[in-house]
Image (cartoon, rainbow, N blue to C red):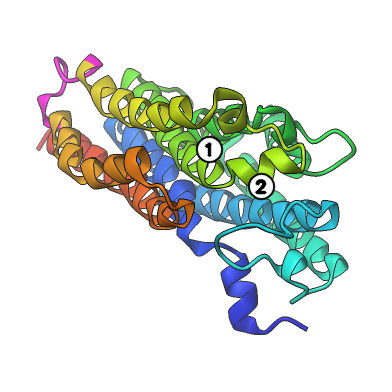
Amino acid sequence: MASTAQWVEGARLRTLPMAMAPVIAGSAAAAGLGAFHPLRALLALVVALLLQIGVNYANDYSDGIRGTDDARVGPLRLVGSGAASPAAVKRAALGCFAVAMVAGLLLVVLSGTWWLLALGAASVAAAWYYTGGSRPYGYRGLGDVFVFVFFGLVATLGTTYTQALTVSAEAVVAAVATGLIATALLMANNIRDIPTDRAVGKHTLAVRLGDRAARGSYVGMLAVALLLVLVVTPANPWLLLVLLLAPVCVPACRRVLTAKDRAQLIPVLRQTGLINLGYSILFTIGILLDLPS
């Protein structure tokens, strides 16, 4: 039976900034529209965090029963290591999804955005079938699309919409940027796993691109994410604060481009998550500084 510490490690807390960033940025965009609602923002955060933890447990379960994690480099895998039974990890994943759905339902009730129930159901289904089911799309190079759409566009714009009942250009820029940074985190993870994924037939986008192009795509995604803010800075120059992240991105990019030992990419996952969180915080400061006094 897995210990509490092992369950916490299996939840992969280093990925949680990826879930927090779009909610923070989306709430900031709502504030820019004069419609910030703290309770709705909190519920959106609960949904995002539980979906992220649920995805992590679901991946651990699905990859573990397929044997994908048998020779994986990196953090503890509960099923692959034998620390927890597949059934227990599956229950943990489904439990996270269930609580996320309850929080999402309450958010929909408070905001009156009933059509978002369908989007919420799609989010949970996409989270499970990323590596679950008989034809997991994460094994066909589509996991990056899932992360960009659901942990970027849906999470950010959904957060803004459930508070303001509309979205803004700033919200769209933040959605694309946080989605790209989240996808870069997944790319770094999958670059690390290229040899083992290729061996077991898991054709992630990193496997399909090849090592060199995959490493270059990580740098490109971070660069585009930061430069996108230039689209909205004519209306709000304070958003140029986001560019302060550029020097922070350099060490992570250098490591991704040059690391020969794939285990050296493990710290990049945490660094990229913190870059996403830093983006959302600087974006929020830029929005708040532009609000009428």
Q: Quadrant of the C terminus?
A: top left
Labelled disc at residue 1: none
Given residues 160 and 17, the one toward you in this image is 17
Residue drawn where x is 26% and y is 29% of the image: 226
Mark 1 Cα shell of 10 Å, populated few (<14), some (14-19), many (≥20): many
Q: Main secondary structure of the magenta part?
A: loop
Q: Secondary structure at mark 1?
A: helix
Q: Is residue 25 above or below residue 38?
A: above
Q: Is residue 186 above or below residue 101?
A: above
Left or right of residue 112, residue 135 in this image: right
Q: Position of residue 34 (x, y in %)?
A: 30, 33
- Mark 1: which amino acid? Phe
- Mark 2: which amino acid? Thr
Magenta extent: 231-238
Left or right of residue 31, residue 66 in this image: right
Displayed quadrant of residue 258: top left
Residue drawn where x is 63% and y is 82% of the image: 4
Residue drawn where x is 90% and y is 38% of the image: 134
Disc 2 or disc 1, which is closer to the eye? 2
Report the residue marked by disc 1.
151
Q: Position of residue 52 (x, y in %)?
A: 59, 51
Q: Position of residue 247 (x, y in %)?
A: 16, 41
